[in-house]
Image (cartoon, rainbow, N blue to C red):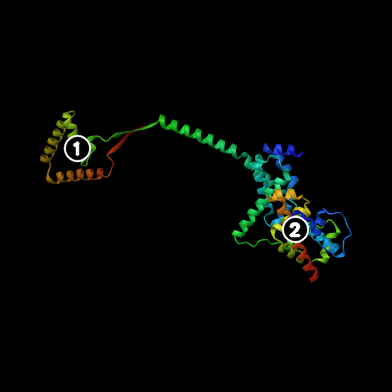
C-alpha cells in the first residue's frame, strides 16, 4: 500500500492523527471506540513488571560474562606456571635404567651376549671363572648322590623358567 | 542520567550502567515481548536481550535511539524463540493464563478496563488476541500502545517504512473485523 492509499484510508489516518479533525459518523465513532478499548485492554494484558529476582539473575549473568576474560587469563597463567614447574621437576630429576648384567640373562640372548662379550676379548676372566664354576659343579656332582643332584638341577631349572617371564632390564637405582 | 553517559557506561562494561538500563527499559521491553510471544519466556528473553546488549554494545554507533536498538535485539530474540517453538512443534502462542496468573494480574488503573470487560468477556478478548498473528500484535503494540513512529518501527523490524505501514494497515483491518464479529455475537 502506498502512502497515498494509506492516507486515503480514513481509519488508519484517524488513529494516526494524520488527517484534520472532522465530524465523525456514528459508525466511525463506534469502530474507533471499539478499537481504542481493545487497545487499552491489550495494554493491560501485556503489562509486565520485572521481578527483582529476574533483575538479580540478569545482572549476575552480566557480571559473570564481565569476569570471564579475567578468569580465562588466570586459568592460563596458572596452567603455564604448573607446566613450568612440572617441566623443571622432570628435567632436574631422572630415573637411571641400566641393562641387566649378562649373568642374569636366561633366555636366547644369553648366548648372543656371551659370544659378543667374548669376541671383544674383554671378559676372558669371565670365561675362566665360568670354567671354574663348571669344574666346581662337576665336583659337586661327583661328591653327592643322584637324588641331591636331581634336586639341585630342578631348582636351577625353576629359577630359569621363572626368570624368563621377567624383563631383561633391571632398575638398579632411582634418585630424586 | 542522559543516554550518552549511559551508553559510555555500557561500553565500559560498568555494572551500574546495566542496572540503570534494566530499571529504565525492562518493563517496556517485557511488555513488547509479552505481546509478541504470549505469557511464556518473557523473563528468559529479557535476560537474553541484556546479555546481547553486553556482548554487542561496541557495535552500537548511536545512529538510532538506544531504546530502538534494544527493541530490535528483543524482537530478533523473539523471532528466534518463535522459530524454535515451531521446530519443536510447540503450541504457538497460548494467551490463556492459569487461574493463579489471573489473580496475580495487577488491577486496571482506570475504569475503562472494567467497563470494557463488561462488554467483552475475558475469553472473547483472549480469542481475539490469539487470532492475531505475532507480527500483527507486535505492530499494534509498537504503534498504538507504545506510540512509536513508523520510522522507529521500521528500524526495529528492519523493514521499509512502506512495508510497515502496509502491514499495520492489514493488522488493524483484521483486528477490526474480529472485533466486529464479537460485537455481533454479543
Quarter residue B135 falls in: bottom right
Q: Report which residue position mark 2 lands on.
A: B169
**Chain letter of disc 1 in the image:** A
The secondary element bearing badge 2 is classed as helix
Could you tell whether B89 is left or right of A56 in the image? Answer: left
The N terminus of chain B is located in which quarter? top right
Could you tell whether B45 is left or right of B114 in the image? Answer: left
**Eyeballing the image, is A158 above or below A46?**
above
In the rendered image, residue A65, in percent from the top left (x then y), is placed at 62, 42
Could you tell whether B41 is left or right of B175 in the image? Answer: left
Residue B27 visible to the viewer: no
Quarter residue A26 falls in: bottom right
In the rendered image, residue B114, in percent from the top left (x then y), is placed at 84, 62
Looking at the image, the residue that sits furthest to the front is: A4
**Chain letter of disc 2 in the image:** B
User: Residue A112, which numbered label?
Assistant: 1
Q: Name the one closer to the observer, B24 or A140.
A: B24
Amino acid at each position: 500500500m502506498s502512502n497515498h492509499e494509506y492516507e486515503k484510508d480514513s481509519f488508519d489516518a484517524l488513529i494516526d492523527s494524520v488527517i484534520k479533525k472532522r465530524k465523525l459518523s456514528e459508525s466511525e465513532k463506534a469502530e474507533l471506540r471499539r478499537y481504542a478499548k481493545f487497545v487499552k485492554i491489550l495494554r493491560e494484558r501485556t503489562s509486565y513488571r520485572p521481578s527483582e529476582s529476574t533483575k538479580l539473575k540478569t545482572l549476575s549473568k552480566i557480571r559473570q560474562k564481565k569476569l570471564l576474560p579475567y578468569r580465562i587469563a588466570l586459568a592460563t597463567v596458572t596452567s603455564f606456571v604448573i607446566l613450568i614447574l612440572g617441566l623443571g621437576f622432570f628435567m632436574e630429576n631422572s630415573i637411571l635404567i641400566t641393562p641387566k648384567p649378562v649373568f642374569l640373562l636366561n633366555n636366547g640372548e644369553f648366548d648372543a651376549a656371551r659370544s659378543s662379550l667374548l669376541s671383544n676379548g674383554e671378559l676372558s676372566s669371565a670365561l675362566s671363572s665360568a670354567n671354574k664354576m663348571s669344574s666346581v659343579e662337576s665336583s659337586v656332582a661327583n661328591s653327592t648322590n643322584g637324588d641331591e643332584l636331581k634336586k639341585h638341577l630342578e631348582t636351577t631349572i625353576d629359577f630359569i623358567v621363572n626368570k624368563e617371564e621377567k624383563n631383561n632390564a633391571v632398575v638398579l637405582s632411582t634418585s630424586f | 542520567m542522559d543516554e550518552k553517559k549511559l551508553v559510555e557506561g555500557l561500553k565500559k562494561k560498568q555494572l551500574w550502567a546495566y542496572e540503570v538500563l534494566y530499571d529504565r527499559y525492562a518493563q517496556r521491553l517485557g511488555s513488547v515481548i509479552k505481546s509478541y510471544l504470549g505469557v511464556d519466556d518473557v523473563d528468559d528473553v529479557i535476560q537474553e536481550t541484556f546479555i546481547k546488549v553486553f556482548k554487542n554494545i561496541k557495535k552500537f554507533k548511536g545512529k538510532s535511539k538506544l531504546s530502538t536498538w534494544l527493541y530490535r535485539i528483543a524482537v530478533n530474540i523473539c523471532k528466534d524463540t518463535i522459530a524454535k517453538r515451531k521446530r519443536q512443534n510447540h503450541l504457538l502462542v497460548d494467551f490463556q493464563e492459569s487461574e493463579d496468573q489471573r489473580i496475580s494480574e495487577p488491577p486496571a488503573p482506570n475504569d475503562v478496563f472494567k467497563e470494557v470487560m463488561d462488554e467483552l468477556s475475558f475469553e472473547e478478548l483472549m480469542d481475539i488476541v490469539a487470532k492475531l498473528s505475532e507480527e500483527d500484535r507486535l505492530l499494534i503494540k509498537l504503534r498504538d500502545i507504545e506510540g512509536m513512529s513508523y520510522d522507529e518501527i521500521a528500524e526495529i523490524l528492519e523493514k521499509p517504512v512502506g512495508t510497515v505501514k502496509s502491514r499495520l494497515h492489514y493488522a488493524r483491518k483484521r483486528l477490526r473485523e474480529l472485533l466486529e464479529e464479537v460485537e455481533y455475537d454479543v
